[in-house]
Image (spheres, rainbow, N blue to C red):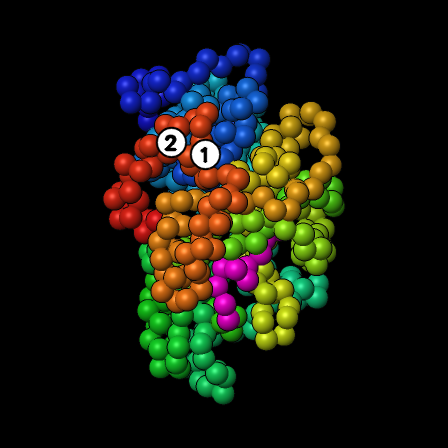
Amino acid sequence: MSNVLDDPIAASVARDVPNATVGAIVVGGDYQGLGIVRSLGRRGIPVCVVDDQFSISRFSKYCTYFEKLRDLQSERKVVDSLLEVGARLGLSGWVLYPTREELVAAFSRFRTQLSSSFRVPTPEWNTVQWAWDKRNTYQLARNLGIPTPNTYYPENIDELAELDPLTPPFAVKPAIKEHFIYATKAKAWRANSHSELRALFQKASEIVGPGEIMIQDLIPGGGSQQFSYCAFFRNGEAVGKLIACRRRQHPFQFGKASTYVETIDLPILEEYSERLLQAIDYYGLVEIEYKLDPRDHQYKLLDFNARTWGYNSIGARAGVDLNYMLYADQVGQPITRCRGQSGVAWMRLLTDVPAVLMASLAGDVSVKSYLQSLLDCNVEAVFSRDDPLPGVVELLLVPYLAVKRGF
């Protein structure tokens, strides 16, 4: 591990930290982490970025420290490393921001140990468990009357025979995403026939083991039918919130990430999401994803993310800077209740271009509509006039990103 002050490449982005200033530690420094860094840094809040990959956030002028760790997937190692970094750099009382599910799990399970050195907004495990495991998520949603896709939990390949009367296609997906996505670089697989379902189920079971593979009714349509409720939630209510439509995603069928997002008004998702969050006494930042099923016109819950999300930088432009609201609450500053305005668009150009090419081949996007969406975009995920270096570095990293993450 090295301090950014000793790194000749990143030394130019270092900033002096006032001793009396409480800062933030952003764990995971991709464009998702960059949104948090800029949100806080533009307000004069010092930020330490911690990552196990080649991080574009380290090149932001708002990054005060950068620490490269060997492993962010082992919960015990993450916790021990953060405690060591915090002690060495004098980051006592700084606010922790996880950007990945496995980090949420680590912070939740080791919350007591981490709280001895940091402010830990991540809730206790009895709350986080409802987001971590989709089997819990869907059970909770059903109990609360929130629509979900039809989902089946076969323990072995023989039990797939019970699905023979059902008509494909199906989605083959993990109950715990992190046990699957790093091995496959995919959130789910599509099975277009029962024979393909059996083959994919067998393949998936070899990756994550029996009992964790779910078979789900595949809701027709792509990203334009996916919506998200994003909020800073506290004491049973959303202090700040916005609703977003995922206009485009990459990959096209099972998007690992949004590539073009627009804020909208959709009260039914506020009702569903707040019912769920109140039931588990949730605290912190949250994104809950839904998909509109054209067959019955219901918005069905897909994912529950107890962390920041990729397009979090849309919040400040929409008038509801959720990243900062969490920080302010953690350090005892007053917060004004607010709602994000509709019609604000966010894009990540690096992944939006291939997403559009795929959608064009499927006849879902015209050149005219795409060009108009570029003109309508308010926020780019990485490129920023006041902080240009991360965008330049990301362009140089395209080969690395393609191999390491498949974008």
Specify few, some or many for label 1: CA neighbours under 10 Å numbering under 14, 14-19, or 20 or more: many
Q: Nearer the viewer, residue 53 or 176?
A: 53
Q: Report the mark closest to the observer, 1 or 2.
A: 2
- Label 1 vs label 2: CA separation? 8 Å
The disc at residue 293 is none
Specify few, some or many for label 2: CA neighbours under 10 Å numbering under 14, 14-19, or 20 or more: many
Callout 1 touching callout 2 (CB < 8 Å): yes
Q: Amino acid at mark 1?
A: Leu
Residue 106 location in percent, x, y?
49, 42
Location of residue 191 by image quarter: bottom left
What SS does tag 2 mark? helix
Which residue carries the number 2 mark? 390
Residue at 35 percent of width and 18 percent of height: 12
Residue at 51 percent of width and 24 percent of height: 41
Looking at the rendering, the stretch of residues picked out in magenta corresponds to 220-229
Locate residue 394 relative to residue 317 in the image: left or right: left
Residue at 50 percent of width and 67 percent of height: 221
Q: Nearer the viewer, residue 76 or 173?
A: 173
Q: Amino acid at mark 2?
A: Pro
Which residue carries the number 1 mark? 34
